[in-house]
Amino acid sequence: QRGAPETMALRGIVLAFGGVRAIDGVDLDVRQGEVHGLIGPNGSGKTTTLNVISGYYKPEAGSMTIGAAALPPGAPEGRAARGIARTYQTPRLIGEASVLQNVMIGASISGTATFVESLLSLPRHMADERRMKAQARLALAAVGLSALAEVRADRLQHSELRFMEIARALMLKPGFLLLDEPAAGLSVEEIKRLGALIKSVSRQGTGVLLVEHHADLIFDICDQVTVLNLGKVLAAGTPAEIRVHKEVVSAYLGG
Ligand code: ADP
């Protein structure tokens, strides 16, 4: 689908809040075509790392690159153009708009525009709108929500909103997709479906960075796992390597 797979590389990222280092020298490599799990106890710096990649936070030190190109720190408005899409711990929606419209805004979303701004910036030309609608319907089909396209978004159940958010992110055809606890509140059956969806997205060449508490999902679908503790990388490797990592097992997996 694309050229040679690229790597998003973080090196030595440091970010402090009021003198406390939330992330303290984090290195991370997310390769296109792979699912990379980011795990660790509460407060270990997972969401902060996503916010640094998204440009919401500007790190005090470190570098971010995609391939040979630097990723400018603290510039959320440029992330969509660099092919970086994300979802949030709390799904975001315009309740009065249809599911289809909520997905369509993914195509015009940027880090700083509000949802309403994104909605208003949807194309006014019929041909563009038709193309975008067709694309949004494909995205909804991919996440299994086709039947709900015309329903008001505030009628959806929590789990359906999570899948809607992923459909919206797919509108960007992202090179990298950041998922912040997508399995939270989902049933075992839904988590299975989510895992299959994430796998199929990565197989299309997208690099997925998955922050998740469900250890089973992480170990089932990830190609690489990075474990954070107190803002530092405690361990990084394949799921098989992480499973037998002594410090990880005692500090995080509770074995
Ligand atoms: P995780 O996602 O792993 O639970 P976070 O990245 O949310 O961890 O938080 C890492 C650390 O940074 C925690 O100690 C948290 O209290 C702190 N922190 C996160 N966001 C903020 C913020 N906006 N202001 C102050 N402290 C923050």
Image: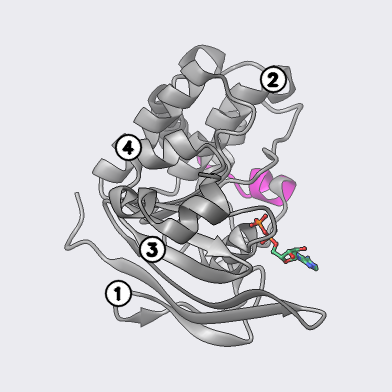
Query: Dot 3 corresponds to which residue?
Result: 236
Verify whether residue 120 appears in magenta. Answer: yes
Task: Identify whether 102 is placed above or below 118.
Answer: above
Give percent across and percent down for residue 6: 27, 66
In the foreground, 89 or 56:
89
Q: Residues within 10 Å of mark 1 (few under 14, many from 20)?
A: few
Label disc, if present, on residue 152 of the rendered structure = 2
In the foreground, 133 or 213:
213
Does the CB distance between marks 2 and 4 fall below 8 Å?
Answer: no
Task: Identify whether 212 is placed above or below 83.
Answer: above
Q: Earlier in the sequence, mark 2 or mark 4?
A: 2
Query: Dot 4 corresponds to which residue?
Result: 199
Q: Amino acid at mark 2?
A: Arg
Does the CB distance between marks 4 and 1 fall below 8 Å?
Answer: no
Spatial separation of the CA atoms under disc 3 and disc 4: 20 Å
Give percent across and percent down for residue 38: 48, 55
* Most distant residue in the top direction: 147
* Residue at figure coordinates x 71%, y 79% from the top left: 16
Spatial separation of the CA atoms under disc 3 and disc 2: 42 Å
Q: Earlier in the sequence, mark 4 or mark 1?
A: 1
Q: Amino acid at mark 4?
A: Lys
Of badges 2 and 4, the one in the foreground is 4
Query: Dot 1 corresponds to which residue?
Result: 67
* Residue at figure coordinates x 58%, y 42% from the top left: 181
Q: Residues within 10 Å of mark 4 (few under 14, many from 20)?
A: many
